[in-house]
Amino acid sequence: MAQDSATLAVPDGSRATRMRAPMPPVARGFLWAGIGFLIGTGFMFLVDRFPGSNPPFITEPSVTVGWLLGFVGWLLGVGGYESVVRPWLGLPNTYVASRGWRRYFELSLDNKVVGIQYMVGSVATFGIAGLLAMGMRAQLMGSNNDVFGGDVWYLSAVTMHGVLMLLGVAVVGFVGGLGNYVVPLMIGARERMYPRLGGMAFWMYPAGVITILLIPMYGGSTAGLWGYEPLAAQDPSGQIFYYLGIFAMSMSSLLTSLNLLVTMIYRRAPGVTWGRMPVFAWSQVAVAIMSMIWLPEIQTGMVMGLLDRVIPTNFFNPNGGFALAWESLFWLFGHPEVYIVMLPAWGVWLEITSVMSRKTLFAKKYVITALGFLTVLSSMVWAHHMFTSIRNSEMIPFSFFTESVSIPTGVMFLSALGTMWNGRIRFNTPMWYVLASMFNFTIGGLTGFFLADVPANLALHNTFFVVAHFHFTLLGGMIFAWLGALYYWFPKITGKMYNERWGKIGALLVFVFFNATFLQMFLAGLHGMNRWVAQYPAYLANQNLWISISAFLLGIGFIIAFWNMAISWAKGKKAAENPWDAKTLEWITSSPPPAENFSEIPVVTDGFYRYGAAKPELPLFEAETLKALARRQKGRKEAAAGKDER
Ligand code: HEM
Ligand SMILES: [Cu+2]
């Protein structure tokens, strides 16, 4: 490492003295979380003795307060104490970043460390939520199975699977993971605007995942990802972990998005104008705007739902409250959420198609305009999830706006296709994933049209047709693009090259068995297979058996896809500096980049994606950057160790 990232924490230039940490930060996090929990529950025990509860500490109000203090204890324990609290109190700065692997187990101020923390965390969460899916498919393999030992536990698995996949994988994978890692590099920034906030934001995420995993220990939660009222009010106590877990995970994404947005506003390198900024970064601008509006909205909803249980207030309680308000609150966030997830996936399509086709990105201005339309339109369609519960007169506008979303969406397809047109396309693993994602998303989008159509929706609502539709967009569209992105930036992040043959085998297996699994789900839905059921009529058993078998094979495909990355990271060959001949800024620094991202801030004089020019590399960057490149070739050690940049 050229420079210890700790120096970033000490802006006044004074070097912090290294304090020997008494305990690894994560261990201290758990300890302080435990202490916080005990203080919270103890306090509640003193102020309110909970007649009849047994044991007396474990009641919903006391667990809620205990969780809040535990959450604070966790954040301080993993490093918030040194990096945030002490500086606030004016105490001498004792924050020193660790080196090597230890950096990943503490609060870090380096965008690349935080990006890897999020990426590895989201892959692990994908594994856990994927295992739950395998369990669900084992249950549904026969019409009368009992794999989970009771319907409550099956439904709790559905809830946890949905919440973890959506808030713990889909959002986090692109915003926290690749967003933190790639966006500052793409715009030529040394760091994000608020490194400490970025470091803290990450640690909220595992707290949220763990909270969701605690659901079964507190009785389960059967109301599903969207926690519909008044069902949720009747749920076992595990439901409070649903509210708290979603709160923590969404807070993590919100703060990350804010940080990235401010970074893009203030930290673009000279010459990286808004117009030149790469599409992946642009997609994160749109994501940040949507996150700033809709994540606080759903967090408010989560708090209201929680208060309904622990105070109890009466927001959604049918006796005096309004249960349908929850549905609107949820979907006001829920629909923009799918765009928060999908926009970066489209950004990835376009980055990769341009690079792999060696062609200038087609219609970039229209793509950015379309991102703007999607940001607005996606907030005007939420009641298409509620056609069975709203008035007839309210249906047409929601149907209309939903279908109009296909226009800006089509722009993404057109741009990708126009970019590939007449290009010399390199069909490697990232490109395979992008093409697969485009194929899958087409099916997801077209079946969305059926669901936006009111008469069809009324028949298909809550059947497996819907389950298949949203998996085609989320899993087939977003997760495939995510895998493509991970493979594409793999050489940048690890400095190693992945194994192309195993990459393609993984991509092929995942593509074939994804379609085998979820195409059949459309048919099951049309034949009357309901969702959120652990048992179903025997005539559907044969079809479900085949769905389950395909799902298990899909699981194996995912294991191969991720295993290949893990093995290549450990043992792969060293990658070339810019193996794709890409034009965006992250590829002009070393792989992996030094702590400060660029040894010299690049100065950009032309748009990116200029393929086909006579000398593609040269006209892009000015002399300073070329000097930096030359210096790096002489040896990074010399260039970085010798001088202090600040
Ligand atoms: C590994 C492959 C996967 C399989 C086999 C699978 C299977 C399932 C099944 C059987 C359900 C329950 C449907 C019901 O009864 O309502 C479900 C629900 C769900 N899945 Fe997946 N899934 C997979 C991956 C994903 C991914 C990658 C995402 C998102 C990025 C996702 C998001 C969801 C959501 C949001 C729900 C709804 C949860 C709810 O109703 O509360 N799934 N999945
Ligand atoms: Cu929607």
Image (tube, helix red, strand yellow):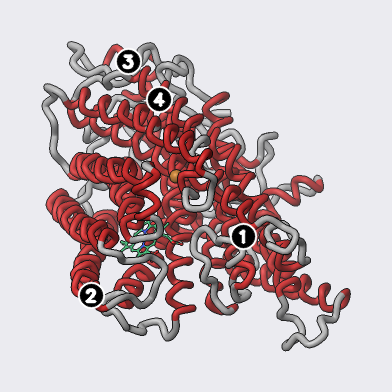
Which type of secondary structure does the marked residue at label 1 adopt? helix
Q: Nearer the viewer, residue 414 or 175?
A: 414
Front tag of 2 and 3: 2
- N-terminal label among 2 and 3: 2
Q: Which residue type does callout 4 highlight?
A: Ala
Which type of secondary structure does the marked residue at label 4 adopt? helix
Find residue 491 and report its horizontal and vertical position in percent: 28, 43
* Mark 2 to mark 4 CA distance (whole Å): 45 Å
* Residue under numbered circle 1: 78
> For ligand 1, which image quadrant applies?
bottom left
Front tag of 1 and 2: 2
- N-terminal label among 2 and 4: 4
In which quarter of the view is residue 562 placed?
bottom left
- Image check: 357 left or right of 179? left
Q: Is residue 22 above or below residue 490?
A: below
- N-terminal label among 4 and 3: 4
Q: Is residue 276 above or below residue 341?
A: above
Q: Which residue type does callout 1 highlight?
A: Val
